[in-house]
């Protein structure tokens, strides 16, 4: 029977198939590394967390090993509750088989668990939180840039590319993020570019814009940064044009659909960009799963959070040591992610690229890509912003 079997497998192709199927054994990973995915799987925050969880899972499906070890995701539900989040974080911290944590969605849930993870010294990667008070520990890094980050890119573009120094910032009084970014634009221009005064003007929804236009005119500004929603921004710009003010306008992501030509806006993430090769890998993989659809920024940040954890496992001097993994997270420099190149600053927030587009009747035109300061400089800027300096 053996002779007959060997004879039947005399051709190279048949023998190769037989060898691969019955004799050759793939080397299994020597060990397993366990990463806790700490998220609101249930409760009122669960729907918001779904996107970043999908990004984490997609990244794990593409990159399952690190240094020859299999990466296993272990899911923990904080139930959208701050008390449960703290208790679950303690459970994770006590489990010595857990090397790292990715999560959690929601600023309050993150704050509730951050001290527990910090005290245990367990390396933690957050995907989507942008509140700067969450970072500033030795174990915690973020995939998302802090809230003020696009404002600095807008300032760099206005001063260094457009050559403007007569500047003003505006925000919607109903939009806290708009206010944060407008104030940071002013602060950053005054401190970094030594511009004497950059006024910050509030706009109330439905208010008479006469006094707003008067304030703009008296400021002498030639360029205005307004990171507000599309509707209120459109109203303000239309009124300014009617008043005869000739201004250069810079806004935020919400201006993508504004429909006004020759205004500029910042974009933290563009799924159709070729900023990195990893962005293409990510977008293609997501498109195959979802019939060609484009992923959201939140999904991309979940993907990048996993890549940051994997990079720490790959580069740590001792991947079995939580302390060593924390150091490796803080040392990430130029990592290619779906949302651009990522460098972790000394306070845990990422230094990453922000694009500036000019709106046109056709496709928006990429006019500038801002790369922030070195990690050391970025840390000082973040700390000043956090303390209101």
Image (spheres, grey):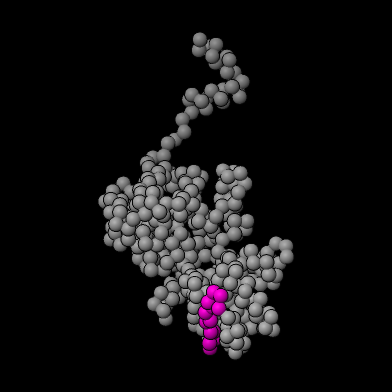
Q: Give the residues in magenta.
A: 195-207
Residue 166, located in which quarter of the rendered image? bottom right
Q: Is residue 330 above or below residue 60?
A: below
Q: Report if residue 264 is visible in the image.
A: yes
Front residue (pair 315, 82): 82
Q: Report if residue 181 is visible in the image.
A: no
Question: Percent from the top left, x then y, of residue 346?
Answer: 41, 68
Question: Percent from the top left, x then y, of residue 359?
Answer: 68, 67
Q: Residue at x 45, y 44 (%)?
A: 65
Q: Residue furthest top?
A: 1
As drawn, is 67 to the left or to the right of 168?
A: left
Q: Is residue 202 magenta?
A: yes
Q: Residue at x 62, y 80 (%)?
A: 223
Q: Residue at x 72, y 62 (%)?
A: 362
As drawn, is 354 to the left or to the right of 56?
A: right
As drawn, is 66 to the left or to the right of 114?
A: right
Magenta part, dominant SS? loop
Residue 382, located in which quarter of the rendered image? bottom left
Q: Is residue 124 magenta?
A: no
Q: Residue at x 47, y 46 (%)?
A: 57
Front residue (pair 80, 143): 80
């Amino acid at each position: 029977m053996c002779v007959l079997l060997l004879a039947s497998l005399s051709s190279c192709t048949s023998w190769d198939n037989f060898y691969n199927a019955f004799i050759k054994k793939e080397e299994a990973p020597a060990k397993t590394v366990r990463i806790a995915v700490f998220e609101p799987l249930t409760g009122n925050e669960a729907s918001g967390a779904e996107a970043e969880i999908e990004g984490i899972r997609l990244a794990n499906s593409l990159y399952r090993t690190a240094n020859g070890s299999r990466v296993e995701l272990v899911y923990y539900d904080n139930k959208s509750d701050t008390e449960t989040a703290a208790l679950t974080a303690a459970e994770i911290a006590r489990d010595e088989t857990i090397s790292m944590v990715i999560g959690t969605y929601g600023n309050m849930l993150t704050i509730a668990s951050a001290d527990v993870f910090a005290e245990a010294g367990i390396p933690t990667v957050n995907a989507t939180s942008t509140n700067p008070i969450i970072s500033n520990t030795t174990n915690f890094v973020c995939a998302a840039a802090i809230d003020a980050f696009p404002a600095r890119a807008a300032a760099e573009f206005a001063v260094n590319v457009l050559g403007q120094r007569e500047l003003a910032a505006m925000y919607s009084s109903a939009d806290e993020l708009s206010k944060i970014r407008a104030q940071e634009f002013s602060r950053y221009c005054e401190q970094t570019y030594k511009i004497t005064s950059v006024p910050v003007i509030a706009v109330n929804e439905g208010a008479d814009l006469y006094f707003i236009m008067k304030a703009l005119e008296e400021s002498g500004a030639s360029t205005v940064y307004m990171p507000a929603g599309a509707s209120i921004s459109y109203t303000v710009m239309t009124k300014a044009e009617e008043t005869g003010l000739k201004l250069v306008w810079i806004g935020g992501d919400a201006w993508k659909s504004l429909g006004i030509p020759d205004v500029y806006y910042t974009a933290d993430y563009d799924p159709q960009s070729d900023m990195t090769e990893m962005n293409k890998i990510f977008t293609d993989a997501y498109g195959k799963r979802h019939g060609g659809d484009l992923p959201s920024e939140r999904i991309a940040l979940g993907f990048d959070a996993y890549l940051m954890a994997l990079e720490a496992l790959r580069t740590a001097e001792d991947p079995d040591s939580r302390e060593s993994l924390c150091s490796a997270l803080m040392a990430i420099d130029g990592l290619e992610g779906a949302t651009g190149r990522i460098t972790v600053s000394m306070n845990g927030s990422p230094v990453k690229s922000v694009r500036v587009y000019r709106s046109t009747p056709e496709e928006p035109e990429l006019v500038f890509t801002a790369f922030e300061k070195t990690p050391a400089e970025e840390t000082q800027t973040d700390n000043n912003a956090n303390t209101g300096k």
